[in-house]
Amino acid sequence: MANKRLRSNIEEVRYRNVPGYRLLSVRGWAFHTDNSPLVLQVYVNGRQHEFERIHTVRQDVLDSYKDILDNPRIGLQVNIRPDEDVRMLELKTDTGEVILNMNEKQLEKCSEYSLLQAYCDSFQPLGVQGECIAVGWALSADGKQVDFEVLDPEGKSIPFDCRRIQRGDLVELNLVDKAHSKAGYYLTFFGDVNRRYTLRLTNGTDVLDFPLSDQHENGFGLVRAYWKAANPVRIRNAIHYFQKNGFTRFMKRLKKGPYQKPESYQQWFDRQAVTVSELRKQEQHVFEFAPKISIIVATYNTPEDYLKEMINTVIKQSYGNWELCIGDGSDNDKVERYIQSHYASEPRIKFKKLDQNYGISGNMNGALSLATGEYVSLYDHDDLLTPDCLYEIVSSMQEIHHDVVYTDEDKLNDVTKELNDPHFKPDFALDQLRSHNYITHFLTVKKDLVDQVGGLHSEYDGSQDYDFILRVSELAQSIHHIPKVLYHWRMHPSSTAMNPESKMYCYTAGQKAIEDHLKRCGVNAEVEMMRAPFYGMYRVRYSTDSNPLVSIIIPNKDHIELLEQCLDSIDKKSDYTNLEIIIVENNSVKPETFAGYERLKNKYPRL
């Protein structure tokens, strides 16, 4: 019976069968349709064997399976270093699903009996009549230098130019070490790409004849379209780019092709997201400071699919010392029954059915009453965490036990299921916080500080988290920002993430939160709520009743005309009168500059 959960494809198997330097390399892709982790096991001659696995991004596979696949890092690069002849090779998942099964005859077809290895990423016309370019890599397993020779179709040696190139990708794939990373080649010679040329490699003892031809598949190597659109100007620019930026960036630029759309945020996020192997390492990591984090959530008639996703992203955290505290103000028992039926065996999930709906702050405080951790994190019932979220938060606390930690975030479109609109936040800035709640999610605060400020206040419902962080910021000694997207804010028609006008009361509550914050701080100011399209933004107009003196300092060196323009703009556009203007003379040498100073002093009395 066909396996319906596993999808896989092996594109290449290479077996270097040299005693002392044996290497099996398997390349392809594999994933589970339910996006569950795929744990590999390798068997050599019927016995389980150690191996190296490198996760690679396969955007081409994601494009083909975009309806069921949410992470493109499903590329397989498996390296096996056997110490005996390999007669049978198997790749399986830990549940027995077979990805690859090769016998001795099949392995013979992909065997190489030389220390020399080579690969041709691309063989293309350079754009100049009769000139060709070949890009790839060649190495000797024992680290010896590899010498090149190019042979024409008749087997005669022909002149060529060769540049040796650093290949960091080979280091990442554990094919070479850093000391031998200059294994790439960039060959140019006059010929015809429609004929067969051979690259002869030698290391002093072995000789390997290797055909020059395109060997890349599914994005490995250069894109033909780039060269079809080539012209002399583009060729010169490409060579200049290569010389300036090196091989790795050069290859990335060529792979994009001349007309490809820019990388989307979703593609960027997938490319840099934490890998399964990294999560496994995080799970095994022991922190010196490992506080319990109480994640508090208020639910109210939460849809079952949102509830499931929200809870599961907590359960899948690589950091395990957490508790999920849920305060439910629903007008029915659906949330309670779902949690009891699906998560009764998880002691870290605490649930409290409230006797009525107390609003978002009251329900959150109900969840807060269950918290026993050293830190409290605020979490919305329809949002998602990345699996490394709590790990990154605790990691940031090792040297300083911060009072407050917050992360970057983005939005999840509930219709397209794509991530977009990332919010890369600044470090803590009080004036910016007074203009809008840029901190929002994911916010983690010391439990003692939460108790000190009195939890959340219902009179600010809609912007209760804004009021909360303002009150916390007034007392916190250390507020830390993690510059990494660890929180996904769901966008659906009723959320403020998708429709800013759906909850106008939120912005009024935010204005009140800032006004009360300023009063507590003893700051005399007025708060203005911005209108569309700037909902959620505020302008604080600080009182200047004391009319303090403002000093404007302007350095100048031999730019008297520009200086006069600057002074004119201050004089005409500033309605503040208690000003002085100080010019800092910075080693001017022109006589007219000093004459200009005297003229400007007469023109501007405040100078």
Image (spheres, rainbow, N blue to C red):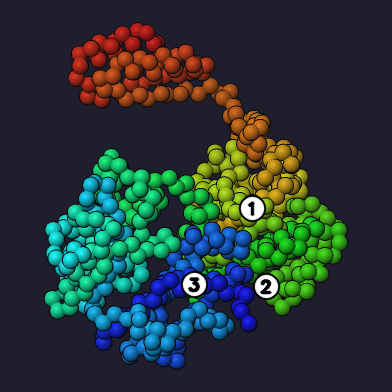
Residues at circles 2 and 3 in contact by the CB criterion of under 8 Å: no
Residue of label 2? 348
Q: Marks 1 and 2: in contact by CB < 8 Å?
A: no
Cα–Cα gap, marks 2 and 3: 39 Å
Q: Residue at x 35, y 7 (%)?
A: 602
Which mark lies nearer to you, 3 or 1?
Answer: 3
Residue in view at x 76 percent, y 70 percent: 339
Q: Nearer the viewer, mark 2 or mark 3?
A: 3
Residue at the spot x=16%, y=74% of the render?
A: 203
Decide if residue 208 is in sight here.
Answer: yes
Amino acid type for the residue under numbered disc 2: Arg
Query: Residue 9 shows which numbered tag?
Result: 3
Residue that numbered label 1 is attached to? 416
Quadrant placement of the N terminus: bottom right
If you read the primary sequence from the N terminus, does the residue marked by circle 2 or circle 3 appear first? 3
Give the camera-side residue of 396 and 65: 65
As helix, strand or loop, the secondary structure at mark 2 comes to loop
Pick whichever, 467 or 143, lies toward us.
Answer: 143
Looking at the rendered structure, the secondary structure element under dot 1 is loop
Q: Earlier in the sequence, mark 3 or mark 1?
A: 3
Residue 560 to residue 315: above or below: above
Mark 1: give few (<14), some (14-19) or many (20+) Cα within 10 Å: few
Q: Residue at x 70, y 50 (%)?
A: 492
Q: Is residue 442 visible?
A: no
Residue 597 shown left or right of residue 485 in the figure: left
Q: Is label 3 in a helix, a strand or a loop?
A: strand
Residue found farthest to the front: 154
- Of residues 296 and 492, the one nearer the viewer is 492
